Image (spheres, coloured by chain):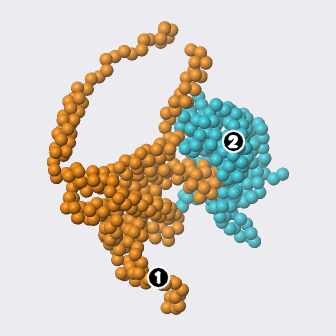
Chain colours: A cyan, B orange
Amino acid sequence: MTAMVRAEQVCKSFGALQVLKGVTLSVERGQVLVLVGPSGSGKSTFLRCINHLETVTAGRLYVDDDLVGYREARGKLYEMSPREAAKQRRDIGMVFQHFNLFPHRTALHNIIESPVHVKGVKKAEALSRARELLGTVGLSDKADAYPAQLSGGQQQRVAIARALAMDPKLMLFDEPTSALDPELVGEVLAVMKKLASEGMTMIVVTHEMGFAREVADELVFMDGGVIVESGPPRAVLANPQHERTKTFLSKVM
Amino acid sequence: MTVVQASAPPAVDAVPLRHPWRWVGATVILVLVVLFIYGAATNKAYGWSTYAQYLFNDRILLGVSNTLQLTVYAMVIGVALGIVLSVMRLSPNPVLQSVAWVFLWIFRGTPVYVQLVFWGLIPTIYQNIQIGVPFGPSLFHLNLQSLSIPFLLAVIGLGLNEAAYMAEIIRAGITSVPEGQTEASKALGMSWGMTMRRTVLPQAMRVIIPPTGNELISMLKTTSLVTAVPYSFDLYSIASREIAARTFEPVPLLLVAATWYLIVTSVLMVGQYYLEKYFSRGISRQLTTKQLDALAKAQTDAGHV
């Protein structure tokens, strides 16, 4: 079995600004990787590269052994057409800091939108699956509510259900609890824990060190576009090797 | 701080604020309106009997129908071409961007009356249309001057002018939708076209509809300029040029035309109200009556705390 995500010297520049300066890591199937680091360290950009919301400018990034964003043939790289890129993204779920639910659709219709219109699942089938997913995230009674009528925590749980409805093989979480009131963070983390325990492969950018310690298989600390330190979360959190990691952890814990 | 458990406080019972000046203002306005109506009803220049005679005249109704057709066809062209132009303006392709920009520059930069005169002159300027190999054999030949196409030219003239304005309205609507919406759609595997159709445009509609309603109402009245083509069977032309010129009573016939413009506009306003309501769903945090009832019931079921 090969790794679900394999990054080899991944670099990303926006014009002259280099945000990622060679990130190499791999995530095995069923593993949970937590990315931490100060803002501007490139962790969100790296996450967005994985489902091709950003295009890698150097290095290689593979998801499930497929090169992200390019086709490789006869030793040359060919830029993917938007259609191919869209197809590649289908199997990768993403949860955003600001939820990004569709405000003009109810919770239920947010969830069935993509299965029905992208995958061509039958509507009745998609609806029953969506209700099931709403149950998993504990929101069975909110099926007909519009996003504006839900709390932040509820919106984020609907967003997770929406991503799960596409049966992804990999889930990306981009600071999923950073926009939430402190008392709502727990309900979102609980859903994520459950997901991890069911064997979902996850990459999570977060500042929740408790979650990292409890759920992650590996913790990666990034700063200035490179990986400074990585390892089992308990070891890294209890005994950071680098000065930069120590300073950062002393501020967030 | 101590919390004292007491029985619920009595509901607020206050004397409402009075607004005497509103009543004074309303009375003054009412008196002025009554005086004006009395004056209009007794003034012979208004020619009310002529007004009544022509309000449902066949020629007038024909004019209403023609005006409505001009409005609808021109708006359909305007909206369809407007969508194309706005997407061209937003596309990363510099060729499409420039073409759209030049179109907007010309059609917004010249008066619609001038444009309509030009369209009227098209059969004079281009007397024949030939399709074929340049400097070679002709495959298709059409003599424009032999056709009687003022209605078509009026529709094209109004439609192309409108497209330039609609393009900007639609562009504003599209750019008003937050970027996160496009990203979420992409992340769910949607193509660009589907993202536009299912995520961006429905949300942009909320911003697009009010000014489009404005454009539609404005178009209804702009059709009175088609006399420049010249096309002379719209409501205004029939009322003022055809009938009033014959009866020498311009005032009642202008009132007839005004009445019909008002009626159509009122119908359009009702339509706009429902469209706006439909596309604003999900925008407000306010709960519907049904949802409020459900919440109240849940509260009662849970018992008073």
Answer with the quarter of the image where residue A30 lies: top right
Question: Which numbered tag is attached to residue A127?
Answer: 2
Q: Nearer the viewer, residue B103 or A38?
A: B103
Q: Is residue B290 above or below residue A59?
A: above
Q: Nearer the viewer, residue A188 or B162?
A: B162
Looking at the rendering, in which quadrant would you find the C terminus of chain B?
top right
Q: x, y percentage for residue B103?
A: 42, 69
Q: From the image, state whether disc 1 or disc 2 is nearer to you.
A: 1
Identity of the amino acid at label 1? Leu
Question: Which numbered tag is attached to residue B142?
Answer: 1
For residue A35, say whether it is visible: no
Give the residue drawn at x 22%, y 50%: B48
Q: What is the secondary structure assignment of the residue under circle 1?
A: strand
Identity of the amino acid at label 2? Leu
Q: x, y percentage for residue A176?
A: 62, 40
Q: Is residue B295 above or below residue B276?
A: above
Q: What is the secondary structure assignment of the residue under circle 2?
A: helix
Give the residue drawn at x 49%, y 91%: B135
Task: Classify 10 Å Cα crowding around label 1: few (below 14), some (14-19), many (20 and above).
Answer: few
Verify CB contact (< 8 Å) between mark 1 and mark 2: no
Q: Is residue B260 left or right of residue A20?
A: left
Given the image, what chain letter belongs to the residue carrying mark 1?
B
Task: Classify 10 Å Cα crowding around label 2: few (below 14), some (14-19), many (20 and above).
Answer: some
Given the image, what chain letter belongs to the residue carrying mark 2?
A
Give the residue drawn at x 62%, y 33%: A142
Q: x, y percentage for residue B123?
A: 38, 79
Q: x, y percentage for residue A47?
A: 64, 50
